[in-house]
Amino acid sequence: MMHIKHEAEERHVLTVTVDNEAGILAKIAGLFTARGYNIDSLTVADITENHAVSRITIVTHGPPSQIDQIHAQLERLVPVHKVVDLTEAGPFVQRELALIKVAGAGEKRVEALRIADVFRAKPVDTTTESFIFELTGAPDKIDTFVAIMRELGLVEVGRTGVVGMIRGTKEA
């Protein structure tokens, strides 16, 4: 009988420093698509004064061998300067911004405001029937807040995706 060994899936946060040129994001997305890898979160921002370099943060998951392959493939792309796996680089900070719309009246409305206060979610829009809360934090904090709001009248969620940095003075 043949036994197939399955590696445990791991979540990884990768930062990719690239030339800020047309088509680079499509190349990176194509690399993932061609191999059947999933992108859980993707953010891109210009990071230099002259707009020449961008930082792409990709959250993905898979067995260690797949993560290593993703890392190697990304480094082979011509406009890529550097690929850092924050998950393996040591302690790092990750944050995400979310807008969460919640509808409700009466006691549910009061409870939504109370819970928002506990999570430090800021109401950025209020009507007599709804709130839009702004929440910044680790992805699991946002997941928890959204799950609680589901029970109180969640209408819609918009999330930016993860941005991460290594703690301390070291640059990723």
Image (cartoon, helix red, strand yellow):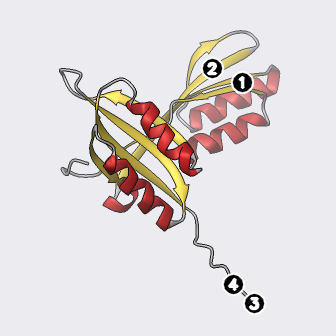
Residue drawn 42% across and 45% down?
94
Residue drawn 40% across and 40% down?
57
Give, as a three-letter code, the residue at label 4: His
Callout 4: few (<14), some (14-19), or many (20+) C-alpha neighbours within 10 Å?
few
Q: Secondary structure at mark 3?
A: loop
Residue position marked by numbered label 2 in the rendering:
132
**What's the distance in space between the residues labelled 2 and 1, CA to CA?**
6 Å
Figure quadrant of residue 79: top left
Q: Are marks 2 and 4 in contact (CB under 8 Å)?
A: no
**Mark 1 or mark 2, which is nearer the start of the sequence?**
1
Figure quadrant of residue 95: top left
**What's the distance in space between the residues labelled 2 and 4, CA to CA?**
51 Å
Q: Secondary structure at mark 4?
A: loop
Q: Residue 102: give its label.
A: 1
Residue 74 is left or right of residue 59, and the answer is: left
Residue drawn 40% across and 49% down?
14
Give, as a three-letter code, the residue at label 3: Met
Q: Are marks 3 and 4 in contact (CB under 8 Å)?
A: yes
Q: Secondary structure at mark 2?
A: strand
Give, as a three-letter code, the residue at label 2: Ile
Callout 1: few (<14), some (14-19), or many (20+) C-alpha neighbours within 10 Å?
many
**Mark 4 or mark 1, which is nearer the start of the sequence?**
4
Q: In front here: 160 or 43? A: 43
Callout 2: few (<14), some (14-19), or many (20+) C-alpha neighbours within 10 Å?
many
Q: Are marks 2 and 1 in contact (CB under 8 Å)?
A: yes
